[in-house]
Amino acid sequence: MSIGADDFKAGMSRRAGAVAIVTARSGETRHGMTVTDWTGVSLSPPLVLVCADKASNTLGVVREGGCFALNVLASDQADLSNRFASKKLEWQRFDGIDCETAVTGAPLLAGCVATFDCALAAEHDAGDHVLLVGRVEALSISERAPLVYLGGRYCGATPLDGGA
């Protein structure tokens, strides 16, 4: 039985994913992309995994700079998610955005539920994507509610402490 891309995508849309933006820097070049395919891999050393489309411009910046940040979005950051997902004005995604520079040099977005500052530890070929493994060099967390994507749309989740 052959599974088509549309059927596979429909099946995958049945699982909830916390929305994040992967940001990267190489020299003066900054880039980023919205992702829902990411996960923790290891506690010791602390590693995260991100799935990047091979056609993504962000992938090249991650490779050149050797680092990336995984910025887990809060429930009120859907506009930011859309901005980094759209190919329109792709090289202007950071214009007017509040960012800090991480230990690795990757951009960190303000107001996120969590940020994982990562040195690129490995990459693995995976069909039309590349699996990026990042060694977490620094981490920040908040108790805000995360932005969740399910069934082709955003939904909220209750924060851990019940607050906003």
Image (cartoon, helix red, strand yellow):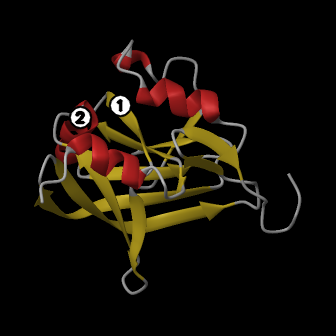
Q: Which residue is drawn at 40% across and 59% down?
A: 38
- Judge from the rendering whether residue 161 lies leftward or rightward of residue 17; answer left or right: right
Along the polypeptide, which appears first: circle 1 or circle 2?
1
Secondary structure category for the residue under label 1: strand
Q: Position of residue 46 (x, y in %)?
A: 41, 77
**For residue 79, what is the image quadrant?**
top right
Badge 1: residue crowd in 10 Å (few <14, some 14–19, many ≥20)? many
Q: Residue at x 78, y 59 (%)?
A: 158
How many numbered discs sit on the rendered protein?
2
Q: Which residue is drawn at 23% across and 52% down?
A: 66
Which residue is most to the front?
A: 1
Which residue is most to the top?
A: 89
Q: Where is residue 54 in the image (x, y as percent from the top left)?
A: 16, 41
**For residue 135, what is the image quadrant?**
bottom left
In this figure, which residue is indicated by the disc labeled 1?
Answer: 30
Which residue is most to the bottom?
A: 44
Q: Residue at x 44, y 55 (%)?
A: 103
The amino acid sitting under disc 1 is Arg
- Judge from the rendering whether residue 16 lies leftward or rightward of residue 48; answer left or right: right
In this figure, which residue is indicated by the disc labeled 2?
Answer: 56
* Image quarter in which the N terminus is found: bottom left
The amino acid sitting under disc 2 is Ser
Badge 2: residue crowd in 10 Å (few <14, some 14–19, many ≥20)? some
Which residue is most to the right?
A: 163
Q: Where is residue 156 in the image (x, y as percent from the top left)?
A: 72, 48
Q: Position of residue 123 (x, y in %)?
A: 17, 61
- Judge from the rendering whether residue 140 lies leftward or rightward of residue 49; answer left or right: right
- Judge from the rendering whether residue 20 lies leftward or rightward of residue 47; answer left or right: right
Secondary structure category for the residue under label 2: loop
